[in-house]
Amino acid sequence: MSDKSPSTEKKQVSAIDRKERLKIPPLVTPKQDSKERIKNWDEVYLELDIEAAQREASRCLQCPAAACTHACPLQNDIVGAFALLEQGDIIGAANKFRETSPMPEVCGRLCPHELLCEGHCVVGKKGKPGAIGRLEYFLADYQRKHEGWPLPKVAPPTGRKVAVVGSGPAGMVVAEEVTKRGHTAVVYEAWPLAGGLLRYGIPSFIIKKSVVDDKVQMLEKLGVTFVTNTVVGKDISVDKLLETDFDAVFLGYGASQPVKMGVPGEDLDGIITATDFLVRAGVPTEHLPPEWRQPIDPGDKVIVIGGGNTAMDCLRAALRLGSQEVTCVYRRTEAEMPGNAKERENSIEEGSEFMYLAAPIEFLGGERNRVRVARCQRMQLGEPDSSGRPRPVPIEGSEFEIPVDTVILALGYRVDRLILETTAGLEANRNGTLIIDPETGATSRPGLFSGGDAVRGPDYVVDAVADAKRAAAAIDEYIRRKQAGET
Ligand SMILES: Cc1cc2nc3c(=O)[nH]c(=O)nc-3n(C[C@H](O)[C@H](O)[C@H](O)COP(=O)(O)OP(=O)(O)OC[C@H]3O[C@@H](n4cnc5c(N)ncnc54)[C@H](O)[C@@H]3O)c2cc1C
């Protein structure tokens, strides 16, 4: 374990040393072979050995300005962690990430690193940036494997209680952070198990479920209670929670309502939303409610409509279910695609095809009302729309047909309005996302806080974690002021 202060850990790197460091060959992240990996649901990336991790850490130029840290929503001290790793202090390096991140094993796997830390890495200006995400979860996994999940210190009990709605990254982090401050956290979750989209969305070839299991167990050890199979707003209201037991409530219910296309034939059998598909395809049946347990067989020809992380996950899940022709149909070009570039590359390696500048305008059914054909239209790029990306403009007379067995709609998600409609005094935008004070996560109703996808709409895990940390600090302050009679 390191006992050095962060300032002494950051070695100053001389100009000569910089040159030498830039000559070190970048890490080739070991992966399962693409032909083999589509036969299983194991993580694509294989374990890293310590020497390879240390060599990669020594490519870090130890920049005093640490642009990587500033680009990280959690402000992880990457330079400090890599200095420790290079010196062989693996646990110290893992703890350096844990100082700011409650989920380095999750963020290391899932963050869009090319947009955040790795996208700002100075080494990347001349070559391949440091493999920051891979080293982050190497360290966190190593520590858990050898020492178990380190339990944070918990302050003496305050006797105050916080209810958390939703057990995704936002809800789990709020539960952890308020528990550390001495409050009791109870998390309500609609699904049978905790984890949010980490369990009921993102497939196990991206993040193995044992990482989520371990996090939930660690929170239980810390004293967090999970009440699952419970829909807040239906089985119990937010008002009831506040009236009976709790001093504050965190609304971390995410954005789960799939966006539909609104084209004729969309309700045919064989047209399925991404969550429906990913949950049925990738979550063990014993972790599902009975109505979700019907197995799924997408057939040979699958198209996935959309171009983000969810679309990539669906393409790759279909390949693992044995589909032969799996195609992403996207209305813009690759340059406008959202989501993690490395997962797009993995998807291509595994055999997904991509059809850019095209969108379905109608689905035609065959026998037994099952979809048979997607009628599509070619697009061209026009002026930027509200997202800042060029608007896809249909080309008249360019219609064509794709024969299909299954169509998966991965067009994005909207926030569910159940809590909004059953809770007085909550202000929201027209699309249902909750309006909060961005500094504190406070909603328009005192005692209710929020963050993550319920506020942002579909976003990234790391932003949900950062929101949750801010909200937990504000909940603590709210409770203490309440205790002191100030609210
Ligand atoms: C397929 C897919 C792939 C993704 N891939 C990535 C990726 O690679 N990298 C990345 O950073 N992000 C990715 N994301 C986005 C990421 O998962 C989300 O941004 C993140 O999970 C948001 O966290 P959250 O806690 O706000 O919400 P969620 O994870 O959605 O958790 C919300 C929880 O609240 C529960 N809930 C909802 N309503 C109620 C209610 N009324 N009562 C009780 N419980 C309720 C839900 O069941 C859910 O468990 C992906 C998303 C999807 C769908």
Image (cartoon, rainbow, N blue to C red):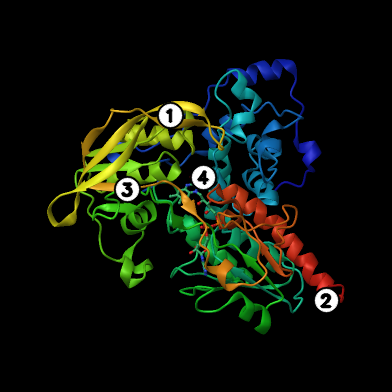
Name the residue that disc number 3 marks. Answer: 408
The answer to whether the residue labelled 3 contacts the one labelled 4, judged by CB atoms less than 8 Å apart, is no
Nearest to the observer: residue 108 or residue 111: 111
Q: Residues within 10 Å of mark 3 (few under 14, many from 20)?
A: many
Q: Can you tell which mark lies on residue 334?
A: 1
As drawn, the residue found furthest toward the front would be: 396
Residues under labels 1 and 3: Cα distance? 19 Å
Q: Using the image, tell me which numbered label, if any, was put on residue 110.
A: 4
Can you say whether 122 is above or below 421 in the image?
A: above
Q: How many labels sit on residues?
A: 4
Q: Who comes first in sequence, dot 2 or dot 3?
A: 3
Separation (CA) of disc 3 from disc 4: 22 Å
> Along the line of sight, which residue is nearer the eye, 206 or 190?
190
Q: CA distance from mark 4 to mark 1?
A: 20 Å
Q: Amino acid at mark 4?
A: Leu
Q: Nearer the viewer, mark 2 or mark 1?
A: 1
**Residue furthest left in the image:** 367
User: Which residue corresponds to the image point at 35% horizontal and 57% vertical from the top-left?
Assistant: 276
